[in-house]
Image: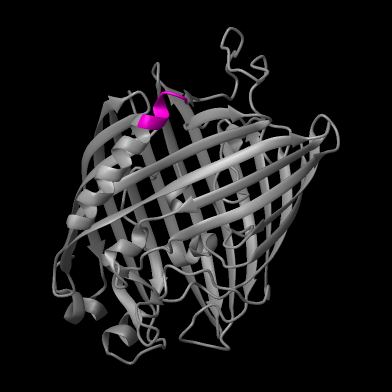
Amino acid sequence: MRRLLAALSLAVPLALGGAARAQSIPSMAGMDMKGMDMPGMDMSQPMTGAYGPYAMNREASGTSWQPDASPHEGLHLMVGPWSVMFHGDLYGVYDQQNGPRGAEKDFVSGMFMGMAQRPVGDVGTLQLRAMLSPDPLMGPTGYPLLLATGETANGKTPLVDRQHPHDLFMELSASYSVKLSANDSVFVYAGLPGEPAFGPPAFMHRLSIEDSPEAPISHHWLDSTHISFGVLTGGLVRGDWKIEASAYNGREPDQHRYDIETGALDSTAVRLSWNPARTLSLQVSWADEISPEQLEPGVDQHKVSASAIYTVPFGDHGWWASTAAWGVRSSQGVDLDAWVLESALKPNARWTIFSRAERVDNDELIAALAGLGAGHGPVFTVGKISVGAIRDWPVGNHLSFGLGGLYAVNFVPGGLAAAYGDDDPTGFMAFVRLKLH
């Protein structure tokens, strides 16, 4: 709790101090920018993305896309030819997971991102991006989360019923794009760490669930590659289509959360994205990962994912966003599926209501619970539904304070009753948040 209070005390003056120089960019896609003066910028046109000649609202985590209708919030300023943006949130969470496998914990989570972008000549765009997380402060064992598996806390045993903390360095990347025509471009992206071309945007960047501090139990099917220590991606944008391929380090981050790791770019991912309308973003992707699990060296995985994101304005200043995603993870002849449906409604500037439903095939629960270390047991299909809300109050020009909570029900089959209890176990989180916007 002392760490939480210290982090909050540092974040407040930083945000308030920067607000005097910053400009807010609530949503630029389709906005009439005439009459809005920002020195050094042509405000008659919306800001373009880093990877192609489209509105920057389309860009999400890594090189992934979201609907053009998505709001794009951040603190923005001009430094010579550089367009600089900051965005972030800090959560203080009380987490209680019930049942025989449950536990409770207070923890801090969130992220802070800085981006700098500038034109290079008449057709080039250079972008630098850094993203940091306070997650390592929660300790190596992360936080309680029933039915979650993946990674390791100590390099010896896998985590089960807990969500691992993300590394301090979530992204340190650079990209360069060249405009080929009014609608076409090519780009290259490199990160240490970075996010390869696989899956939908990472869950903490998906508008449909980004207001929830709870990680999805489908994380290691869809978006666990968002912190890969070594990524090189090349892509082609043609209108509303994008095809890209990545070579990356397939090994997931180890238990050391403060370092920067290195490794061979031995894994491959390919993604095709299409935004057929301002409100819709679609993707399909494939990945071949070499020895991703630290505790299972020599065991490779193959992944496929598909997703659809739908976002529309709601009322005068709100929005409604939904994501449907599917992923399959294959290893040693076993195919494991995960399905996710998320939706969030922001009817006004004060309230956000969010929900998520998941269905996952998992073969790690019994092996981990039995203390067998790394390994796989019977496949069990488990599910989860969570619903929550957050209420925000402005405490500065570009800073808000939020108070929220969520409730989750976990669904387990009879074969797991001995471990999780006869009744479907539940979970609860209460949280506060500081958000730069």
Residue 224 percent across, percent down from the top left? 49, 64
The quadrant the N terminus occupies is bottom left
Total marks shown come to: 0
Task: Choose between 14 and 311: the one closer to the eye.
Answer: 14
Residue 214 on image: x %, y %? 31, 54
Which residue is found at the position 56% from the left and 24% from the top?
A: 28
Q: Is residue 211 above or below residue 31?
A: below
Segment colored magenta? 17-21
Name the residue at the right extreme: 180
Question: Is 150 rendered above or below residue 430?
Answer: below
Q: Is residue 106 left or right of residue 346?
A: left
Q: Is residue 11 magenta?
A: no
Please report the residue visible at 50 percent of the width from the left and 60 percent of the height from the top: 223
Residue pictured at 50% horizontal, 61% vertical: 222
Quadrant location, the C terminus = top left
103 sits to left or right of 375? left
Q: Is residue 223 above or below residue 39?
A: below
Give the image quarter of residue 127. top right
Percent of width and height locating residue 346: 35, 30
Q: Nearer the viewer, residue 129 or 62?
A: 129
Image quarter of residue 155: bottom left
